[in-house]
Image (tube, rainbow, N blue to C red):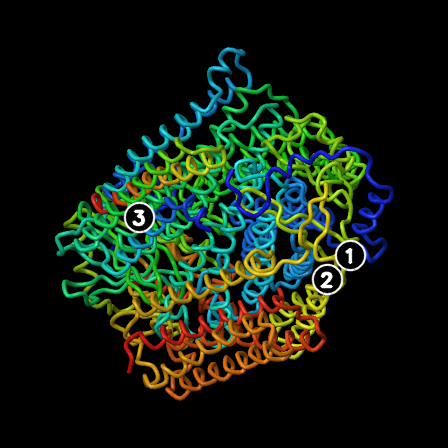
């Protein structure tokens, strides 16, 4: 095996070690990983705790959104009912969709990843535990406040995809739409933070020997999920930014009378929105794949084909977005491309379905609750999948688009593809986090009620759509024969609700959170999350030689528990996990992980506060909250990136690994690169928006500032980027003084700021305002984005200067310095790109 | 003059959900899709049946059958080969049909501009050069057996024009004109509804398309093009005509041949001959005219017409009597 | 990095194909020019993906270790899947 790193695979032969472990080693491990008690428990960052809270919160939103749907179904049971006044109903359906898609579905699969993934990879925790905590608390506070808008009649009412011009100020004058736009903002932050965790976690914290070929299928699902978030979410982040700018500052991105276009929103939204549903589906289907093999007590058939399916879906789902726009009058050739891609994206789903059936056939499936939910989910998802193929056919789409047929389709795929697998997951993995497993007897009732209820709600709904009932209608007229199918659907809703209620009863009676004393491997699964665990995850990190380690090595659990593998204790008294290489999982270094802290919690509260207070237009208070968030963030970061002693530690059997690594192999570097990809995607979507608006309404565009401005601005940005790189090089040079590298960075920051202000004033001088036209809006949007990056870079550089003054900037290389270099360098390059783009079109003056 | 309209169907039938309008076409633009629809349903049923059969065997079959079924071959056949074959066929059919439905027309078809408003439909029949020659609202009249080109626009937010028995839908987007065709091969009434959420009472934004035999259509259009200035039939209606001006109706509603030229609301020149009121939601009679004028907010909350509930009942009756003369 | 580019090579080719076609259709609408360029791009990308699939498959057969075999096999499969998608992607140029 050609090695990826300098690690010698022959060293694996030293494990399992023999002889007893030293006294006190286990106690030391427990001490390092101890979770605070009392109120301080809220500052915990262990993935078991954060993950559990995350799952619980997401489930709470599922219940809340479900109640909204129940009331909606009561309203629609009969024509012209007044259960809800029109405006309230419009808020209800908007909130139902928004809560389900943004506050339940994505966070839930993310949360299940947080709970299951580290244990499945035999890592001690996710690579950035405080980041997870921050992401969770921001989501928790922000999500609940967002939901509360319903009680004030301030909930958004433009539908979950909020099309302008309906959601522009002219037609949505209240702050309802702003709640959605700013409320979704922190969800986006949570999702991006989670994605960074998952990518670095899956690629760098796997147990040694767990090559990509031996990685559990759930890890693949989460990896593709996270990569898709990184590419898709920036589109909706940009879109929400544009709509909020239009509402607040009257910049006409979507106003055709001034050179904007309503369809721009649809493109930006659906470029995110379609991958979003696969973001939701892939992890859930990955969980099904894991459960199917356990429940059939055999290896998953077609494991590698499923990996292919994930990779293919991850890519092709980005090529189908305009199938939500077939009825908008796009050029037919374009429409054809999207139809073709929509057919292609359904093949990977079929691969998974048949892989599951083949596995069930070869194995000896046990008929328990998880099996029921898995099989029920499979059937339901297939029904949804075939209606999906139907609506990918353009002429058929033109009839059923925006009708209840689509409502039926989307619930079939989402409930079959995510909700049922989620319940299967709850029953299957409850033993890992609870003292008692959930009840099999009750579970079967829960399943049949939910399954039957679901079919009764949504099967007739296909007919309702074919009978002419559009979506998002608060009522319908009598005499249109719509009463029968609507009444049936409503009856089904109550059956489904009873199933959910029974589940809550089961939960209340049986779920008792415990990590050490859990119910154990009740289904006899073969993957690593079933090893005996404590708050430190596993006692030692095993070497993996197969896809099903517990099946292939019956004594593995015992040997791991006895500490016979990597890191049987706290090698230098702190929380640690192994960082391994991405392809072959060869050990590279030991990561020191942070423990509990109040700063992520505070930063999250103030971040959520910033967005929410901004929505109610109390600007001073919002700015204050924002400043407090930044302060909390910086206090949190101040504690990170400290020198670790000793520089190398024994990770087991005498193998020494470094404790502090910098440069492209460091996990922090990877996190920053991923963040820069997110920002780069926003730039890309901004460029698309720019070219799109120019293409649609070129008559509103005029030449920019005189061309003479371009070279100095360009050079200034490139110089700043160069200085950032130079600063890093200076740090490594033995002869540079304490302040040379930091000074180089400060110069870089100053130049960035100066050049940005010059660029801004050149546009001001040209007379183009943000409100003037689509061009003005887009140019100023670019300037706003660049301004934000410049400001963040400036804060980072000042922070770095303080660290330098305290002697925290190690030589020759330092992680904090590297990250600031990366960010500053990128900011310079982005500035150069933006200044070029905005001046080259329609033509340099 | 009463407009002779086919009485074989009533407005209720136009809005009926059974048989499902999507599967009950009345013209070629909907008809060709129906065959595709049935093919798609058949495909769906086949796939579900295959999956169910395989699942059944996998769960309950005998050991031997299960073992024959289980294995990578099933994933390659069922998950790769079978979908590729079926989907290729469907894609080819679907793309060909899409091309067919949007093939260029001769260029001399009748054109109508329909503008989506919150929450009604502004209609303008166009002449050969694209200028409006006749204005109307909420009810579209077309001749049987010919393709009609609709130029769809939107005055405020995005709406969608959908009359399922005649065609698939097309969105009306501010700042653009989208073009669709409809054709009715049988005389009759065809119900439609806005299919893109446009806020407020989007649920109550309907319309009717009425298809006439060619000569009747020509006669109807000719009659409507003559100015509708007729003396009111009785004193009540005359009083109503006066009230129409003094209470402000003329500020929003246009009646051709009078000095009522408001454009904010539907054109009322031929309101009495319309089959429905309020954009497809009420039958058109004296009672509903009074009810709508007096308090449209109670019927269609949030619509742009203020409630005239302070008007005495006698005034409302007079206005209704006047409107009834506008055929 | 190179390993990932190789593993995902087929899909990257599909992505280039798709977005090239999307840009062409957005700029040239449903015209003869658009159809011609579409067919050319489709053919080019199809050849690239098919070539990648074939060469990866060959390398999978000759690979010295299981992980290498796995990598080449998966690269071949993604390229093959991409080829099917690319063919479908080109059909509108012939049919619309």
How many numbered tags mark residues here? 3
Q: Which mark is residue B266?
A: none
Vertical position of residue A5 compared to residue A664: above or below: above
Where does label 1 land, which residue?
A: A42
User: Which residue was labeled with disc 3?
Assistant: A337
Tell me what residue is drawn at x 73 percent, y 31 percent. Answer: A557
**Mark 1 and 2 residues: CB-CB less than 8 Å, in contact?**
yes
The answer for how far apart the CA atoms under marks 3 and 1 are is 50 Å
Q: Residue furthest bottom?
A: A765
Which residue in the structure is indicated by mark 2? A601
**Mark nearer the N terminus (2 vs 3):** 3
* Chain of residue at mark 3: A
A737 over A302 or under it: above or below: below
Per the image, label 3 sits on a secondary structure element best described as helix
Chain for numbered disc 2: A
The answer for how far apart the CA atoms under marks 2 and 3 are is 46 Å
Both marks 3 and 1 on one chain: yes
Find residue C68 and report its horizontal and vertical position in percent.
Answer: 46, 37
Q: In the displayed structure, does residue B314 sit left or right of residue A13?
A: left
Residue drawn at point x = 38 percent, y = 51 percent: B193
């Amino acid at each position: 095996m050609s090695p990826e790193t300098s690690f010698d695979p022959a060293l694996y032969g030293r494990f399992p070690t023999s002889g007893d472990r030293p006294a006190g080693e286990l106690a030391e491990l427990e001490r390092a990983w101890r979770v605070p008690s009392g109120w301080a428990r809220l500052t915990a960052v262990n993935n078991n705790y954060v993950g559990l809270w995350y799952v619980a919160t997401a489930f709470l939103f599922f219940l809340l959104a479900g109640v909204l749907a129940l009331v909606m179904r009561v309203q629609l049971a009969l024509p012209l009912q007044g259960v809800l006044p029109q405006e309230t109903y419009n808020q209800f359906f908007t909130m139902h969709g928004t809560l389900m898609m943004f506050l339940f579905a994505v966070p839930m699969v993310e949360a299940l990843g947080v709970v299951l993934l580290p244990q499945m990879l035999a890592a001690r925790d996710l690579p950035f535990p405080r980041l997870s905590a921050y992401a969770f608390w921001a989501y928790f506070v922000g999500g609940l406040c967002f939901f509360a808008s319903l009680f004030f009649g301030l909930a958004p009412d433009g539908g979950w995809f909020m099309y302008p011009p309906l959601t522009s100020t002219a037609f949505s004058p209240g702050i309802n739409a702003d709640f959605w736009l700013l409320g979704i903002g922190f969800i986006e932050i949570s999702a991006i933070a989670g994605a960074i965790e998952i990518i670095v976690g899956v690629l760098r914290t796997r147990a040694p020997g767990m090559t990509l070929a031996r990685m559990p299928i759930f890890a693949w699902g989460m990896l593709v999920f996270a990569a898709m978030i990184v590419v898709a979410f920036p589109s909706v982040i940009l879109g929400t930014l544009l709509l909020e700018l239009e509402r607040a500052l009257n910049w006409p991105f979507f106003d055709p009378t001034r050179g904007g276009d309503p369809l721009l929103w649809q493109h930006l939204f659906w470029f995110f929105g379609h991958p979003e549903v696969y973001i939701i589906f892939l992890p859930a289907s990955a969980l099904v794949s894991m459960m199917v093999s356990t429940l059939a007590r055999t290896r998953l058939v077609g494991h590698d084909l499923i990996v292919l399916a994930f990779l293919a879906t991850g890519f092709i789902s980005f090529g189908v977005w305009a199938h939500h726009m077939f009825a908008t009058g796009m050029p037919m050739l374009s429409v054809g491309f999207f139809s073709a891609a929509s057919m292609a994206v359904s093949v990977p789903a079929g691969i998974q379905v048949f892989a599951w059936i083949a596995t069930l056939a070869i194995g000896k499936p046990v008929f328990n609750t998880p099996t029921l939910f898995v099989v029920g989910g499979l059937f339901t998802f297939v029904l949804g999948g075939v209606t999906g193929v139907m609506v990918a056919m353009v002429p058929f789409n033109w009839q059923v688009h925006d009708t209840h047929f689509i409502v039926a389709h989307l619930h079939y795929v989402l409930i079959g593809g995510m909700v049922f697998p989620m319940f299967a997951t709850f029953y299957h993995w409850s033993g890992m986090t609870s003292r008692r497993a959930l009840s099999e007897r009750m579970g079967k009732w829960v399943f049949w009620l939910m399954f039957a209820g679901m079919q009764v709600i949504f099967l007739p709904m296909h007919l309702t759509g074919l009978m002419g009932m559009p979506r998002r209608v608060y009522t319908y007229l009598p005499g249109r024969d719509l009463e029968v199918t609507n009444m049936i659907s409503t009856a089904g809703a109550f059956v489904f609700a009873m199933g959910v209620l029974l589940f809550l009863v089961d939960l209340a009676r049986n779920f008792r959170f415990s990590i050490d004393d859990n119910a154990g491997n009740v289904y006899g699964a073969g993957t690593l999350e079933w090893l005996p665990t404590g708050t430190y995850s596993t006692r030692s990190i095993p070497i993996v030689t197969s896809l099903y380690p517990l099946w292939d090595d019956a004594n593995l659990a015992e040997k791991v528990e006895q500490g016979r593998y990597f890191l049987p204790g706290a090698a230098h008294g702190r929380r640690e996990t192994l960082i391994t290489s991405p392809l072959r999982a060869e050990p590279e270094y030991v990561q020191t992980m942070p423990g509990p802290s109040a700063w992520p919690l505070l930063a999250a509260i103030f971040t959520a506060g910033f967005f929410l207070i901004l929505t109610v237009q109390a600007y001073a208070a919002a700015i204050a909250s924002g400043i407090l968030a930044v302060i909390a963030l910086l206090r949190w970061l101040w504690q990170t990136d400290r020198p670790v002693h000793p520089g190398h530690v024994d990770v087991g059997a005498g193998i020494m690994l470094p404790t502090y690594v910098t440069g492209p192999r460091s996990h922090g570097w990877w996190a920053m690169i991923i963040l820069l990809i997110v920002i780069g995607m926003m730039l890309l979507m901004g460029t698309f928006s720019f070219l799109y608006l120019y293409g649609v309404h070129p008559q509103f565009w005029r030449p920019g500032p005189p061309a003479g401005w371009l070279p100095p601005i360009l050079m200034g940005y490139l110089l700043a980027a160069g200085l950032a790189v130079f600063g890093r090089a200076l740090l490594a040079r033995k002869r540079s003084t304490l302040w040379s590298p930091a000074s180089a960075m400060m110069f870089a920051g100053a130049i960035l700021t100066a050049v940005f202000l010059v660029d801004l004033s050149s546009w001001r001088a040209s007379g183009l305002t943000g409100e003037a036209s689509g061009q003005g809006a887009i140019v100023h949007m670019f300037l706003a984005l660049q301004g934000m990056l410049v400001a963040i870079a400036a804060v980072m550089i000042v922070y770095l200067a303080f660290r330098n003054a305290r002697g925290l900037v190690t030589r020759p290389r330092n992680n904090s310095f590297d990250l600031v270099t990366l960010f500053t360098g990128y900011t310079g390059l982005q500035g150069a790109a933006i200044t070029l783009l905005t001046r080259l079109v329609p033509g340099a003056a | 003059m009463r407009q002779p309209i086919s009485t074989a169907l009533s407005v209720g039938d136009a809005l009926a959900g059974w048989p499902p309008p999507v599967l009950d076409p009345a013209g070629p633009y909907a008809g060709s899709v129906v065959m595709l629809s049935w093919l798609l349903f058949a495909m769906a049923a086949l796939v579900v049946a295959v999956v169910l059969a395989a699942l059944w065997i996998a769960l309950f079959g005998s050991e031997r059958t299960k073992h024959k079924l289980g294995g990578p071959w099933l994933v390659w056949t069922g998950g790769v080969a079978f979908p590729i074959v079926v989907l290729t066929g469907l894609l080819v059919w679907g793309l060909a049909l899409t091309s067919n439905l949007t093939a260029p027309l001769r260029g001399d078809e009748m054109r109508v501009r329909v503008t989506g408003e919150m929450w009604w439909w502004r209609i303008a029949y166009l002449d050969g050069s694209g200028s409006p020659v006749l204005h109307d609202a909420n009810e579209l009249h077309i001749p049987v057996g010919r393709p009609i080109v609709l130029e769809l626009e939107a005055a405020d937010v995005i709406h969608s024009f959908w009359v399922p028995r005649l065609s698939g839908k097309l969105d009306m987007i501010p700042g653009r004109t989208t073009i669709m065709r409809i054709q009715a091969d049988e005389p009759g009434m065809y119900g439609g509804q806005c299919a893109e959420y446009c806020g407020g009472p989007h649920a109550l934004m309907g319309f009717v398309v009425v298809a006439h035999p060619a000569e009747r259509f020509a006669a109807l259009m000719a009659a409507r093009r003559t100015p509708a200035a007729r003396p009111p039939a009785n004193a009540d209606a005359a009083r109503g005509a006066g009230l129409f001006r003094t209470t402000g109706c003329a500020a929003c509603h246009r009646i051709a041949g009078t000095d009522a030229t408001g454009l904010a609301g539907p054109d009322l020149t031929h309101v009495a001959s319309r089959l429905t009121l309020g954009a497809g939601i009420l039958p058109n009679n004296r009672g509903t005219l009074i009810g709508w004028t007096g308090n449209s907010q109670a019927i269609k909350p949030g619509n742009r017409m203020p409630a005239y509930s302070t008007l005495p009942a006698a005034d409302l009756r007079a206005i209704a009597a006047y409107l009834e003369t506008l055929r | 990095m190179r390993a990932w580019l190789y593993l995902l090579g087929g899909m990257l080719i599909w992505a280039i194909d798709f977005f090239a076609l999307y840009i062409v259709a957005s700029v040239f609408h449903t015209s003869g020019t658009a159809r011609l360029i579409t067919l050319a791009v489709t053919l080019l990308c199809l050849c690239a993906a098919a070539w990648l699939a074939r060469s990866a498959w060959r390398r999978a057969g000759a690979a010295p270790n299981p992980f290498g075999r796995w990598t080449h096999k998966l690269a071949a499969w993604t390229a093959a899947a991409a080829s099917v998608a690319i063919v479908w992607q080109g059909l509108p140029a012939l049919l619309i």
